[in-house]
Amino acid sequence: MSKRDYYEILGVSQTCTEVELKAAYRKLAMQHHPDRNPGNAECEHKFKELSEAYDVLKDGDKRAAYDRFGHAAFEQGGGGPGFGADFASSFSDIFDDLFGMAGGRRTGRGNGRERGSDLRYNMEITLEDAFGGKTAQIRIPTSVTCETCSGTGAKPGTKPKTCQHCGGAGKIRHAQGFFTLERTCPVCQGRGQMIEDPCAACDGAGRTTRERMLSVNIPPGVEDGTRIRLAGEGEAGVRGGPPGDLYIFLSLAPHEFFQRDGADLHCRVPISMGTAALGGDFEVPAIDGSTARVKVPGGTQTGRRFRLSGKGMPVLRSKQSGDMYVQVTVETPQNLSKRQRELLAEFEKLSSQDTQPESSGFFNRVKEFLDGMGSRGSQ
């Protein structure tokens, strides 16, 4: 009897990716697993077929050989798949989904101690805080080890007892055919221990909820979205288990003057028409609390940028700093007096292409364009 095509067995195309291949295998393997279909010989056969196909196609070299020679590549001692170590590795890909795996961590614990959950704390800081760094105090409600029972969950003077169902292993083995499968003990829920007299202070959990004050060191140069890990400051473990971690996620509050781009700072400064035309200077504040003077040459136009070297943000964990860029906008005068209007009107009459080359050049090009359109229309 000829073998079915491996791609057909898994229901994927020959051009499928590794992710698509693995997803297809997991779905079908869970559907046809013998333990989910006890006594069903057809499902057992399909499961073997799926595992054999996946074992070949998940390996780049085997897949290339199969694509070129088909099943013949693994006949006559050609390295065909069996149900030894290769099958075990294929089966482990779905073992997480079937038996007692959650979040990359087994739920079963032979000694009853479980690691506490990681916690997240969102903190907003100012741009000045991000520039100079700071030590912040935060208050967080979290689970801590119960002081009454020292985290055991048992009433003081008593101890947890070994689960008789699993012998303290937290899991039981089940043999079916050539499979030996492990499952979380349903009696002790994988802890391996039973508490007959639970602690009244924590109801047997081994931990209680309390608000804690913690210090967080924020280094200079942190950016929006920076994550700070405080090891062991997360939720307390169950029944004396190790605590999780606390992750501080930083966000920067909007600044009234600066906009940040990596290590560089940007700001916009309005200047008078006279300063732009004649030249001058002005002072701007810097993020370090000092001031910097910007010199404006005569004839400066809106949008021109001036670079102040080293006046930006520090680069995290280095001695380097970014720059500060000042972009000027020329402000058009408003609410003019009669005399001011007269002077501006006189100035406008005296203006020429030399004093206003950009606007003069633009309108000259417009005139030439319109003249050209008119000459083409008269033809």
Image (tube, rainbow, N blue to C red):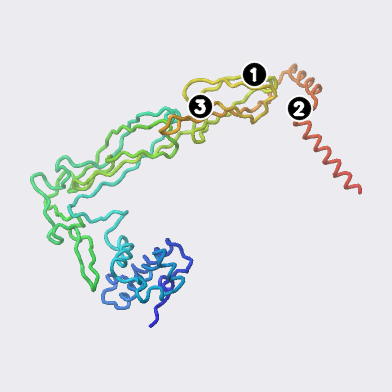
If the image is split into quadrants, where does the N terminus sit? Answer: bottom left
Residue at the disc numbered 2 = 356
Numbered disc in front, either 3 or 1? 3
Q: Quadrant of residue 23?
A: bottom left
Which residue is label 1 attached to? 280
Q: Amino acid at mark 3?
A: Gly
Mark toward the start of the polypeptide (3 vs 2): 3
Instruction: Provide the residue designation for mark 3.
Output: 310
Q: Is residue 107 left or right of residue 75?
A: left
Nearer the observer, 208 or 95: 95
Point out residue 10 in the picture as x, y percentages from the top left corner: 41, 70
- Packing grade of label 2 (10 A; few <14, some 14-19, many >=20) is few
Mark 3 vs mark 1, CA separation in Å:
23 Å
Which structural element holds mark 1?
A: strand
Amino acid type assigned to the residue bearing label 1 in the image: Gly
* Residue count near mark 3 (Cα–Cα under 10 Å), binned few <14, some 14–19, many ≥20: some
Q: Nearer the viewer, residue 236 or 226?
A: 226
How far apart, in angstroms, are the residues tagged by discs 3 and 2?
Answer: 35 Å
